[in-house]
Image (cartoon, helix red, strand yellow):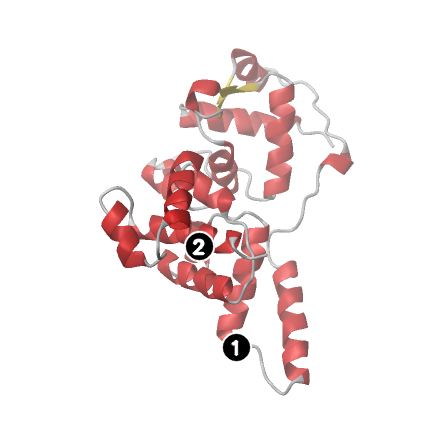
Amino acid sequence: MEVKEPIVKLIKALIEIDKPVQRQLLIDFMMGRRSRQIEELELSDKEMYGIGETHDEDFWSSVIDAAYEAGLIKQMGSKNNALVHTPAGKKFTKKPTSVVIPDDEINETDSDVPEIDSLLEQAQKERLMSGHTVSPLAKQQIKLITAIDRHIALDAFAESEGLGLDEVLDDLEMLAQQKRHLDITYFTDEVLGSECMQELLEYFDSAKSDDMESALEEYGDTYKEEELRLARIVFRMKQIK
């Protein structure tokens, strides 16, 4: 697949952002996703925001890899490997040349809904056989599980569903109680950072109880309650075998 034009868009986005950005944040920016970082950095006001919304996360991940391998973008070791454009990348935007990615390296899916609808249909059939219908809560959880499988930012998912992040955390805590293992570290590493996450996981591992009141007493001056809840969810998920 020819990805010359997507790479041009990617580099122009980095030029407009004008600061090193983490890979996931760059993908969210290209796809027009909302997240706490997008809002904090006021990136949704940028001209290039959402310029790549017709493609999914796998596509943009492949484009980033291709641009990196071609020396058009680079990682900043001093900034936790955040991405920036290179001088060669800036020249590329003015005189782009062919860049081809093998089709088998792109696992692009339609990010609109088919997987969710399929899961809902399957759940509906199973519940109907037992004389029940799928509750709104079950539908919401299925959508949440699918969003996590696709590494969609949890705050972006919440906004798309008209929910608060605290409601999404409620669902995650319920899923943890149901022994459903989900990996949300792609999101927690982005909003908290891996070092902070490790600190909080060690706290929950050594604490007598993982109740929120104790966690807030210990870390309430450092972290927001929703950040502590996220860490506790990751901790509980790791206990699920």
Residue 44 makes an appearance in the image:
no
Image location of residue 148, percent across then percent down? 54, 52
Q: Is residue 31 above or below residue 85?
A: below
- Three-letter code, disc 2: Ile
- Three-letter code, disc 1: Ser
Q: Is residue 11 above or below residue 191?
A: above
The residue carrying mark 1 is 135
Image location of residue 26, percent across then percent down? 49, 34
Which residue occupies 70% across, 23% down? 99
Q: Which mark is residue 233?
A: 2
Q: Which mark is residue 171?
A: none
If you read the primary sequence from the N terminus, does the residue marked by circle 1 or circle 2 appear first?
A: 1
Which residue occupies 64% across, 20% down? 69
Q: Which is more foreground, mark 1 or mark 2?
A: 2
Which residue occupies 54% across, 69% down? 139
Image location of residue 207, percent across then percent down? 35, 51
Using the image as rendered, state which of residue 56 and residue 210 is in the foreground: 210
Place residue 92 in its image quadrant: top right
